[in-house]
Image (tube, rainbow, N blue to C red):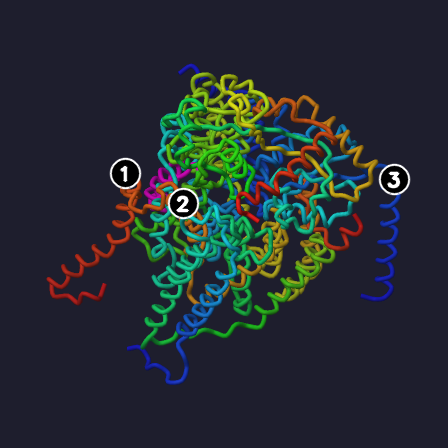
Amino acid sequence: MSAFASGMAILLDPYMLWVILAGTVLGVTVGALPGLSGSTTAALLLPLTIGMGPVASIAFLGSIYCAANFGGSITAILINTPGDPSASATAYDGYPLAARGEAGRALGMSTVASAIGGIFSVIVLIVAAPLLARAAYNFGPPEYFALALFGLSMLGAVGSEVGVRNLMAGAFGVFLATIGLDLTTGVERFTFGFPELSEGLNLVPVLTGLFAISEMLTQATQLHMPRERLALDAVRLPSRDDFRKCAKSIGLSSVLGTFIGILPALGATTAALISYSETKRWSKHKHEFGKGAIEGVAGPEAANNAAVGGSMVPTLALGIPGSTTTAIILAGLIVQGVRPGPHLFNEQPVLLYAVFASMLAANLIYLALGLFAAKAFARITLIPDAILWPAVFVFAVVGAYGQDQSITDVWVMLIFGVIGFYLRRFGFSPAPLVMGLVLGKMVEETLKQSLLIFDQNWLLFFSRPIVVALFAVTLLSVFAPLIGRTIRHAFRREKGLDPLSE
Amino acid sequence: MPKPWPARRLHSDVKIAAAVLLFCAVVWGLTFTFDAVPAALTQGMGPAAFPRLLLGVIALLALALAWAARGRADEAREPTPAIVYWTGAAMLAFMGVMWFAGLLAATVLGVVGMGLLWGERRWPILLAVGVGLAVALHLIFAKAFGIVLPRGLLGDWLF
Amino acid sequence: MSKKTLGLIALGAAALLVAAAQAQEKFPSKTIEVVTHAGVGGGTDITARMMMVQAPAAFGQELVVVNKTGGSGAAALGYAAGRPKDGHTILLITQTHLLTILQGRGAGVKAEDIVGLARATEDPQVLMVGKGSPYVTAKEFIEASKSKAMKYGTTQIGSVDHLAVVGFARKAGLQTPTVVPFRGGGDVVVNLVGGNIDAALLNYAEAESQIKAGEVRALLTLANERLPAIADTPTAKEIGIDAVYSTTRGFAVLKGTPEDRIKILEEGLVKAMSGKIYQDYLASSGQSLKSVVGRQEWQAQIDEFLRTGQEALASLGVK
């Protein structure tokens, strides 16, 4: 316990507080800016941290990581442009809220949910990191395949009303994930000679296109309609009622996000998408989703920030990073002469607790900062469309270009902008497409890896207990609503009611 | 009661399904143009198997969509206003300027041009926003983070 | 635009060009771009950034990393080929780039266009098995591999470690191994511990924490000398297999860069990488402290790899 106390004591050191504050403010800023992500910033600043000493340098990188994940939601809500791919699910409901003049409510909820998710996962990290990290070893390709199937089974539920359309968009997303080199044979697929496509479509340009550019084109269709926005509504923060409504989804998503974050092959984006559909599934207000449900903001935001703490688990306890940012944090640790692994928890507990303390502090700082600044940020929605959207377009271009410094990616973004515009016009929702794209690669790759491991014998999937359990959960979640409906209908018929009227 | 099926006009879902089927057919054809798999790696699923499976699923879903459209009235959709196409053209023009003169020049021209296109008449405000944005991008990306922004032909030639 | 403004622009441009030409008398005269095929945060990217910490002092100019991912180095080669060959664009290459060039996918860059400047890292590959594996020594593993096709986890098809797996098996006279590709070294380690694959060729640092915890056993070092960190693990040569494989990174420019500038770049890079920060990075990430060598030795290594690479690719059946 004394290690814990001396680790936490770094928060009393003014220098450390400055480092954490700087990391947090920087993290929120770059997270919100399309084109700069937490991982890019951490990598660019890694050389700067060398002189800071181990605790300060990891505290700095850790604060950036925590804060950037929250920052991504700001632009997702305000201008439908996820600052980070993990905030894409936040845009599904956050942007409709902002568009109808409730930006402050969405931003406030995102801040609080993010902080709760983040703090929850850091506590899990403190209590059980070495223990939980071992779960990573139990997840091989067959288990990830079963998990990806579970995620895809929710395609029918994640988008707007019509089932067939959602499945089509989802299948199209999975199809898009096949672009690039085939992992197990090295054969190029649908790359048309562009080397930039050989590693598959980058998520950022696709998301920016589907959300920001298609929204800009949709806005253009409404230019002739006069619109009014009320400044007072825009800056109003969420009410106590809102929090009561979201408590369940924040709790569920914090747990889900932490768990998904712990698995090295999955990250904050997957955590947010799966939590969004789970939030919707367990919500009493399903019909509001996609049109501005406050729970739809709370769930994914709690999850993607919980995934931050989660992904630190294998990084610190196994030396295996689960995301780009943790890979950089790992490099930062190694450069400082700190070797991650289970022994770290016995040999350098003070350092670890200092890192955890700084992550807790980062979450609290952006909580205060976010609530304070939400009102100011919310005013962005009051800027006239003809000034706001051209600027958003420029940000979108920079965002698509920034990650790989590739003009091809900017074209990809424009193409997906047009695709997104027509999808929406004909009643398809982009949400299942994104889900398919994120999980699609994993479905195919883990299936092929599994078959190599099993010497092409499909039946061996059923020799793995975790796989069988995940298959069972998937089947249940697909058929449970059907069974429920059948029972309800039977019940109504019993009472002599029309079984088809709900 | 749904309105009776208009005799001559196809339901828009049927048109969508037809377009999707055409897409699937073309892409299915593309899967035959993949390079051959190296002999040492031929075990298991080939590179074309999974995309073909998906194209099949999408095609089936498209048929289901068309089938479900039977007897249902089509939604009324307003025609796409011309401004949408103009906005798209402005985006292409932006790419052209960026290709030639770099991102920063394109930013200034883009913000002013698209702003005017979208009916904003206070051009000094637009110009201020455009220039401010360009300066901010340069400072944040190029100066603070050392990320090389597109310089365009002109920039490549000069620097 | 009026003729007059056009004229003015042309005049301004001409003035700038003259200024640029004058400025180029001394070298380097502006920021040097370091082009890598790795995304921000990837291993190669980190290497570049570690070198850069002490480079401005050596060059008197800033350096900046340009990440051009895609096509196993093709995008990076293509970008460098499109820049003026004035020494202000240098490539951080790995064997991956050379393999890509050998396969004719190097965006027009030919094997003889690569001019080495200095090697940055040299990280030997180590044969490893999980703790659940029945094989405790290299001899037992190799004996068993002669009658059973082992499953090796690797990164991408056609990557350096894939090549090494096939080459090692051939040199040791083993059954053709089954290759299970993963997205990265971390995934390979997890699956080694989880027992999903029989073996893997990894860099020591990638599995350091698992080796220390006894979850992964290092059986054989594919280098000329034993690694200090795993001094008990024999080299392949010691048990009679002539197999040396390593992950190598180094700096290069494209042919056409003036000879005097190549010399300045070589000296500057070696100086920057001899600095404390870079050397500390090498030591703490378990890479050889003899990693940094100058142009001559690095070029010889590139040539050797190009010579044997062709044959190795043919043996894989990758064209």
Dot 2: chain letter: A
* Mark 2 surroundings within 10 Å by alpha-carbon count, few (fewer than 14), some (14 through 19), many (20 or more): many
**Mark in the foreground, 2 or 3:** 2
User: Which mark identifies residue A179?
Assistant: none
Q: Which residue appears at 34% of the width and 55% of the height?
A: A157
Q: Could you tell me if residue A115 is visible in this image?
A: no
Q: Which residue appears at 47% of the width and 22% of the height?
A: A352
Q: Quadrant of residue C211?
A: top left
Q: Position of residue B142 (x, y in %)?
A: 69, 43
Dot 3: chain letter: C
| C-alpha span from label 1 to label 2 | 17 Å
Q: Position of residue A154 (x, y in %)?
A: 34, 52
User: Which mark identifies residue A465?
Assistant: 1
Q: Position of residue A221 (x, y in %)?
A: 53, 68
Secondary element at tag 3: loop
Reply above or below: A91 against A128: below
Secondary element at tag 2: helix
Reply above or below: A394 against A17: below
Asked whether A257 falls inside the magenta stretch, the response is yes
Q: Which residue appears at 14% of the width and 59% of the height?
A: A491
Magenta: main secondary structure equals: helix
Residue indicated by mark 3: C25
* Mark 1 surroundings within 10 Å by alpha-carbon count, few (fewer than 14), some (14 through 19), many (20 or more): few
Label 3 is placed on what type of residue?
Answer: Glu
Which one is nearer the viewer's eye here, C120 or A34? C120
| C-alpha span from label 2 to label 3 | 56 Å
Label 1 is placed on what type of residue?
Answer: Pro
Labels 1 and 2: the sequence-earlier one? 2
Q: Are marks 2 and 3 on the same chain?
A: no
Q: Which residues are magenta?
A: A240-264
